[in-house]
Image (tube, rainbow, N blue to C red):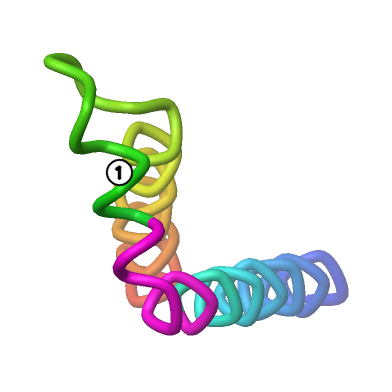
Amino acid sequence: MLLRRLFLQYLRLWQAEFLRLQKAFDATPNLLIWWTFPFPFPSPMIWLISQRAVMMKKIFAMEVSL
């Protein structure tokens, strides 16, 4: 029971961090476009965001299944 509560707390921290990052990126869309535009391949920032999104989907799925 304690482990489950700790795990849920950990998931909520992840969600809060993700939302904080999302707000930061929403506030600077031009910077994001500037960062990705000159390169023919996806920038590390885009890769990081996509990895975060994949991780959040997994976390939400795990939280729902608990």
- Is residue 26 located in the magenta-colored stretch of the structure? yes
Where's residue 34, x and y in %?
31, 48
Residue 46 falls within the magenta-colored stretch: no
Secondary structure state at the residue bearing disc 1: helix
Q: Residue at x 82, y 71 (%)?
A: 6
Q: Is residue 38 above or below residue 32?
A: above
Image quadrant where residue 42 sits: top left
Rendered residue at 43%/27% (across/down): 44
Residue toward you, 59 or 45: 45
Q: Is residue 24 above or below residue 10?
A: below
Crowding at dot 1, Cα within 10 Å, few <14 / some 14-19 / many 20+, comes out as few
State which region is magenta: 23-31
Q: Tell me which amino acid carries mark 1.
A: Ser
Q: Point out residue 47 in the picture as x, y percentages from the top left corner.
A: 35, 32
| Total numbered labels placed on residues in the image | 1
Of residue 62 and residue 19, the one placed in the foreground of this image is 19
Horizontal side, residue 14 vs residue 29: left or right? right
Which residue reaches farthest left?
40
> In the figure, residue 50 lies in which quadrant?
top left
Which residue in the protein does label 1 denote?
Answer: 50
Question: Of all residues shown, which one is farthest toward the top?
Answer: 40
